[in-house]
Amino acid sequence: MGNGQRNGPKAVAVESPIALTRRARKIHRLLTERYPDAHCELDFTSPLELLVATILSAQSTDKRVNLTTPALFAKYRTAADYAAADRAEMEEIIRPTGFFRAKTDSLLKLGARLVEEHDGQVPGKLEQLVKLPGVGRKTANVVLGNAFGVPGITVDTHFGRLSRRFGWTADEDPVVVEHQIGALFPKKDWTMLSHRLIFHGRRTCHARKAACGACPVSALCPSYGIGEVDPVKAAKLLRDSAFGTVPA
């Protein structure tokens, strides 16, 4: 095709579980080389700050959250501070992140629950985290992996999209995806795997126009061809951060 794109992913033979695992781990090794500095892109200095920032990141961007949280964290330093916060004041601070009324409601209830049931501390277990207001498995795994060093898979929109494009899963349910992908990798790799897929999704394998021609795992990807395959044109689609900077 003259425009450097194909109509869709290439057909591949059905893989055995062993072949799938090997291919998945090879992709991860290549992404490790591509993104040696992959990390959580939300700014935080404590489990509570990360929990709050992750709640705020719903339907928002990490950049917007990181611009908002310095003022929030300066005013509310403990769970008790969130529990006793003035709703109007908090809404005004977090307004830029969107859905600020619902998020304020979650943060007020979160602070109260932490004070009442956890002595004001963020618990370090999945089953306790998911019972907190505004916290699902995705948020819980972010906190566990990055604040407590407990391996977890974060199935956000990028992770889910790339998992399906890579042919690791065909499922849309985040919990199913989490378990299916977890079975392909050693548990110790789960947190960094999440970071690397999210980095790749933000910088190369974009939702609307993937930079297939500049992708380090193109030879292993059954979806090669859904985006720009011309190397020069694909290189122009690359971003060197989650916040939109294109490499010179």
Image (tube, rainbow, N blue to C red):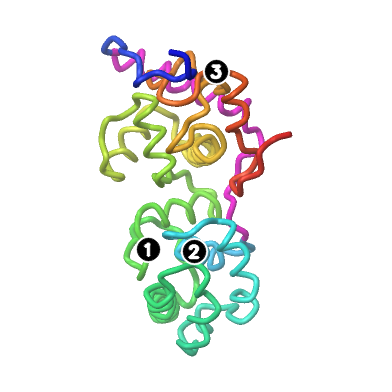
Q: Main secondary structure of the magenta part?
A: helix
Mark pair 3, 1: CA separation: 42 Å
Q: Residues within 10 Å of mark 1 (few under 14, many from 20)?
A: some
Mark pair 2, 3: CA separation: 41 Å
The amino acid type of the residue labelled 1 equals: Val
Q: Position of residue 148 (x, y in %)?
A: 53, 54
Instruction: Indicate the quadrant where residue 11 lies.
Output: top left
* 28 in relation to 194, above or below: above
Q: Position of residue 41 (x, y in %)?
A: 59, 51
Q: Position of residue 56 (x, y in %)?
A: 48, 65
Q: Which residue is mark 1?
A: 135
* 221 in relation to 84, above or below: above
Q: Residue furthest front?
A: 2
Please tell me which of labels 2 and 3 falls first in the chain: 2
Secondary structure at numbered mark 3: loop
x 48%, y 36%: residue: 206
Q: Nearer the viewer, residue 206 or 162?
A: 206
Please tell me which of labels 2 and 1 falls first in the chain: 2
| Quadrant where the image shows the N terminus | top left
Check contact, mark 2 vs mark 1: CB within 8 A. Answer: yes
x 48%, y 81%: residue: 91
Boundaries of the magenta span: 15-43
Q: Is residue 61 magenta?
A: no
Labels 3, 1: front one:
3
Q: Position of residue 174 (x, y in %)?
A: 31, 45
Indicate which disc residue 230 carries: 3
| Quadrant where the image shows the C terminus | top right
The amino acid type of the residue labelled 2 equals: Leu
Q: Residues within 10 Å of mark 2 (few under 14, many from 20)?
A: many
Q: Which residue is mark 2?
A: 51
Q: Is residue 32 magenta?
A: yes
